Image (cartoon, grey):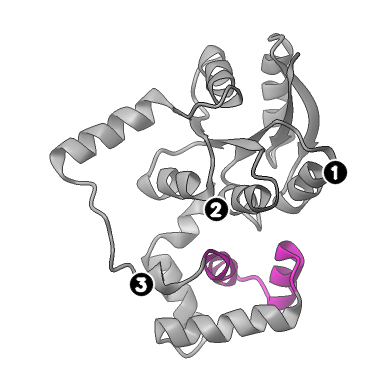
Amino acid sequence: MPFDVLLVDDHKIMRDGIKAILSRDGNFNVVGEAANGPDALQFVKQNKPALVLMDIGLPGLNGVETTAEILRHHPECKVVILSMYDDENSVVGAVRSGARGFVLKNVSDNDLLEALRVVANGGAYLSPQVSDRLLTRIQKGDLECKQDSALDSLSPREVQVLRLVADGKTSKEIATLLVLSEQTVRSYRKTMMKKLGVNNVAGLTQLALSTGLTQLGAE
C-alpha cells in the first residue's frame, strides 16, 4: 500500500515536478499540496498523511517552524525537508525540528525517492553531500557546539516569534501565522527583550541577524 504524501512548496512548478517524480513510483501517493505553513498544518490536521515533503524556505512560517508545529500536534507524521542549501543553520534547524530527512533540491530523482523510502520505513536520511560535509567538519574540529548562544535562553516558540519579528511581521500577522492572540505575541516580545537584554524591536532584529536565525527563511 503506497504512503500518502503532502507536498509543501510555495512554487507550483516545483510541486508539479516532484509530483511527476512520485507518480512514477508505486510507493507514494500525493494526496495534497500546500504553498505555505498554515495551509500545511491545516491539511495534516484534517488528513493525517504519512509523509510530508517540506520546502525549508516557505514565506512567513518557514519549513523548519512548520515542521516543528506539525510534529508537536502529530508526532506520528514523518517530515523530509527540501533545501537549496546545505549550510549548518539549515541542517541543524531541520534536525532539531524533528524532521527525519534533509534532501538538497539538486539531487537525482532516485535519491529523492530513496530518501522518502528510508524515512517512510522509520529511518533517517541526509543527502550524501550534506553528511559528507558535516563529517569533514567534525573531523577537522570546525563544528563546535555553541552552548553560549544568545538564543539558548529562548523557548522554541519564542525563537519562532523572534524570527517573524526580524522578518518585519506585525504582532497581528504573527498571531495569525502561529494561531495565537495578539496579546500573547506581545507578551512573547516583552519576555524576549528582557531575556536578551534589548529594549526594542530593532534590537531583536539585529540579534536575530547576528545569530543567523533569519537565514532559514531566505530561499
> Which corner quadrant of the image does residue 187 belong to?
bottom right
**Whole-Å distance between the Cαs marked 1 and 3?**
37 Å
Q: Tell me whether the residue at label 2 lies in contact with that at label 1, contact meaning CB atoms closer than 8 angstroms.
A: no
**Which residue is drawn at the image coordinates 69% and 69% (left, top)?**
174
Q: Is residue 157 left or right of residue 93?
A: right
Q: Tell me whether the residue at label 3 lies in contact with that at label 2, contact meaning CB atoms closer than 8 angstroms.
A: no
Q: Nearer the viewer, residue 189 or 104?
A: 189
Element class at badge 3:
helix
What residue is pinned by disc 1? Answer: 46
Amino acid type, mark 1? Gln
> Which corner quadrant of the image does residue 185 belong to?
bottom right
Q: Residue furthest left?
A: 140
**Among numbered discs 1 and 3, the one appearing first in the sequence:** 1
Q: Is residue 206 left or right of residue 188?
A: left
**Label 2 crowd (10 A; few <14 / some 14-19 / many >=20):** many
**Which residue is drawn at the image coordinates 80% and 32% (left, top)?**
32
Dominant secondary structure of the magenta stretch?
helix
Q: Residue furthest right?
A: 46
Which region is colored magenta? 156-180
What residue is pinned by disc 3? Answer: 150
Element class at badge 2:
helix
**Whole-Å distance between the Cαs marked 3 and 2?**
20 Å
**Which residue is drawn at the image coordinates 50% and 80% (left, top)?**
192
What residue is pinned by disc 2? Answer: 217
Is residue 76 shown above or below 202?
above
**Is any part of residue 133 visible from this angle?**
yes
